[in-house]
Structures are given as structure tokens and as C-alpha cells.
Amino acid sequence: VDEEDLAGIRPSDQCSQTGDSDLTCKSFNSSVSNKSFTKKSSPNTRLRLHSKEKSFKCSICNKSFTQKRYITAHLRLHSNEKPFKCSVCSKSFTRKSHLEDHLHTHNSEKPFKCVYCDKSFTMKSYLIIHSRLHIKEKPYKCSICSKSFIKKSHLTEHLHSHNNEKPFRCSVCNKSFTQKGSLNVHVRLHANQKPFLCSFCNKTFTQKGSLNVHLRLHSKEKPFKCSICNKSFTQKGNCTVHLRLHGFEEPFK
């Protein structure tokens, strides 16, 4: 099932065993998996999920879906229709479930809990993406270099690097970037923002990655090891430079 399909599912709509939607009641059964369903139409839906049949096709972009409600929500992306409006901040959404998830941000509720750690999220789609970090799942693969990503948006930004596109432009100096994240880091240089604070020495950094490298100085962690002499380093770049002393260009362990 696509991430787009999963993003709008609430816990009350899910099968207690598989996490699929509208599958909580034991009134109807699937002959394929012996799972049970809430609605009379649900067994057919479940069978389509097992067979990966996507019989509902978008006439605009040809994307297909397993259920009618998914294509209904998808079509609103093309028409920019957002009928579900937040009464607190007036933000609008294409799906009612997305509005319900959004409302958690106003009352600080985070009902979607990670089973691997103690982190919680306001939206199920955020939990799905976070869970991929634990299970090392990267479903979005670049067709050019085979690099994989946990989010589709990360793959989209990565593709810019292959065709030299730099669509993200700094409004201060007009410098352009292939990724939005790189632009955000660059903008902090203009604003002198360093939001990432070291809890040991209070030193601040513009990038989280720079903070992570710095923290290794405190923890004495040296994860990058020379494959020739086993000398270790806190940074990959330092290990690469060291390997050249041996006359090798091979990667670190």
C-alpha cells in the first residue's frame, strides 16, 4: 500500500493484526487470510489488497488505487480542493482524517507511538516515515544510481542532482541548491542562526550533522576505521585523507 494510502488512516480504522484500514470487527472474513472486517464491502477490498489489484485509476495522471475513497482524496490534489477546514487556524485539507490528525497539533496530542522507541507523533504518516529509520527501509529508489530514500520527497530532490537542476534559490544572495534542506542550512548562515545546541559544552551549530560529529569529541566515539592499520576517526573525511597516506583510495570500514 502506498504511503499516500496509509497517511489518512486512524488507529480506530485499523486491523488489530495487520494495521490495514476498516478491518477491526469479526463479522466478515477473508478467505485469503482469515482476517475480519467491519463493513460488508470490506472483504472485496481486502482481497484487492492481497492481490495488489488497483482498479481505481486517476484519469489525469494514471495513478491507480485499491479503494474508491483513495482516488477520491487523490483527485482533490489535482483540483486543489480542500473541503476539510480547521476551526482553530483555518488551514484546509483534502481528507477528513488529515484534519483530525492536524487537530492534535493544537492540543499537543501525539497518539501515534513508535513501537521501537518512546517517540510519538501527531500524524500516522510521520510515524510511518520514522519507523523506516528503525527497520532500515528505504522504499524510494533512484533509477539512475540505485540510491534509496525513506521519503519520496527526498528521492525527488535527489533527482535534481543528476540533471544539474537547482530549483531552491536563496532570496538573499541568489545562490541555488538541489535540495531544500541545503537551502535551509545556507539561509541560517545569513541569519547567523545556530539552532543545534551541544548539551555538554553549549556550543551551537547550523546543522544537526555538525552537532552529531561534535558530540563524538565528548563521547570519544570514532566510528570510521582504517582498513589497513585499524586507526579510528571521528569523521569520514579524516579517515579518507588518512587512507591516502597508505596509498589507497579504498573506503573506510
Image (cartoon, rainbow, N blue to C red):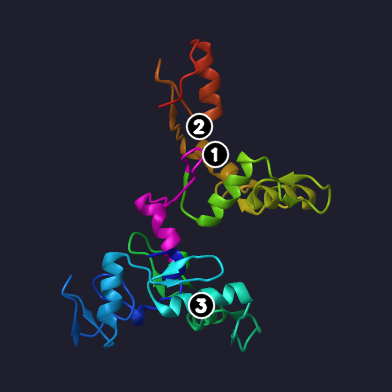
Residue stretch rendered in magenta on the structure: 127-147
Where's the N terminus, which quadrant?
A: bottom left
Q: Residues within 10 Å of mark 3 (few under 14, many from 20)?
A: some
Q: Position of residue 235 (x, y in %)?
A: 53, 31
Which residue is painted at 17% across and 70% down in the image? 32
Mark 1, residue position: 213
Which residue is painted at 48% across and 65% down in the image? 63
Amino acid identity at mark 3: Ala
In magenta segment, residue 138: yes
What label does residue 73 carry, if any? 3
Mark 2, residue position: 234
Which residue is painted at 72% across and 47% down in the image? 186
Q: Secondary structure at mark 1?
A: helix
The Cα–Cα distance between marks 2 and 3, rounded to whole angstroms, is 47 Å
Q: Position of residue 109 (x, y in %)?
A: 48, 78
Q: Kindly indicate the quadrant of the structure image that contains residue 81.
A: bottom right
Q: Nearer the observer, disc 3 or disc 1?
A: 3
The Cα–Cα distance between marks 1 and 2, rounded to whole angstroms, is 7 Å
Give the mark nearer the N terminus: 3 vs 1.
3
